[in-house]
Amino acid sequence: MFTSNLRRVAMLAGICMFGSIVGTSAAAAYPDRALTMIVPFAAGGPTDVLARVIADGMSRELGQTVIVENAPGAGGTVGSSRAARAPGDGYTLLIGNVGTLAANVSLYKKLPFDVLRDFTPIGSVGDAPQIVSARPDLSANGLDEFATYLKTHSAQMNAGSAGVGSGSFLGALILNSALGEKVEIVNYRGAGQALTDVMAGHIDYMVDSSTTSVSAIQAGKARGIAVLRATRIKALPDVPAAGESSYSNLHYDIWNMVLAPSATPKDKVARLGQALQSALRDPAVAERLAASGIEMPATDHQTPDGAAKLLQDEIERWRPLVSGLNIALD
């Protein structure tokens, strides 16, 4: 009897150990297939360019491909809604920015998702200076000259954006407000399409992320009017900063963040956060971002907890700003 009981105990212990090993192995296997990162804008725009750099870096760390999938429309709302409805299994990610994640909460009367309830932040991935990029033949250098030009020509001018509620849309509104002019905004399905029309001279200018505008300005295909910051950026040393003008308080950056559906298990969120931080520490990734004028986010913002606090704080910061613009979208 005693021997039989010992055998039973040993067998149960073996089963428990086996179950523990299998469970640990299953957890360690994540991810065991490709992941998808949804970009809520068209290919070629600043969010898309940044997403592909980050996805490449995360792929190397995770050992699985992170596929970038574009789902443009409604200033980022279409793609964000799709991500919110995705299974929380750790295989779907969303990249958003200050416009799609923070300002839109106040800009739209009713979003088809709740940013804080339906998403779990993984980490902030880069802060992009915003640049006033104009058609090549627009004769203005710096914000003071640009403001003078607008006073005479604003009624005939158009500004481009990546869609209502996007970062470039908000930038155009902020610039209109700061300069005291009202230039009509033409909305595209992505910033890349808008910038193409700026370069072709079909529209006059746009407030664009350094991610896409730097190369166009460096190549002479677009004119860099001003960087909306206190000082110039290394990627465009010849483009004046807002801080050098009469509009020295005009500062507008776009922060970007990777998120997952809120049902994603904590261990997978932690693994994704680890992969994201590893990608940002990769010299090759850092070099590619720096070449586009992208600055690394604060270290604490690169973590899930720090990103969550940034998101909450920014939603509250944009409420009075959007209210002051007197715009509400359906």
Image (spheres, rainbow, N blue to C red):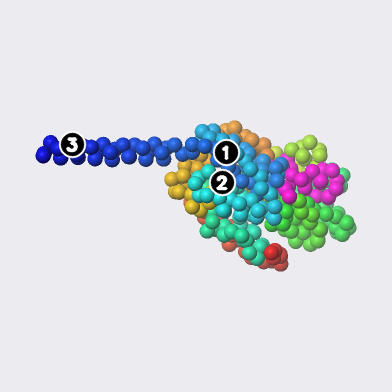
Locate residue 144, reporting x and y percent.
80, 53
The disc label shown at residue 305, or none:
none
The kind of secondary structure element at disc 3 is helix
Residue that badge 3 annotates: 7
Q: Residue at x 53, y 35 (%)?
A: 64
Residue that badge 1 annotates: 66
Of residues 135 and 274, the one nearer the viewer is 274
Q: Looking at numbered disc 1 in the image, what kind of residue is underneath it?
A: Val
**Is the residue 292 above or below the residue 79 in the image?**
above
Tell me which label, 3 or 2, sits earlier in the chain: 3
**Is the residue 123 above or below the residue 316 in the image?**
above
The kind of secondary structure element at disc 1 is strand
**Which residues are the magenta region?**
189-214
Q: Residue at x 74, y 44 (%)?
A: 192
Of residues 10 and 81, the one nearer the viewer is 10
Q: Residue at x 79, y 43 (%)?
A: 196
Residue that badge 2 annotates: 93
The kind of secondary structure element at disc 2 is strand
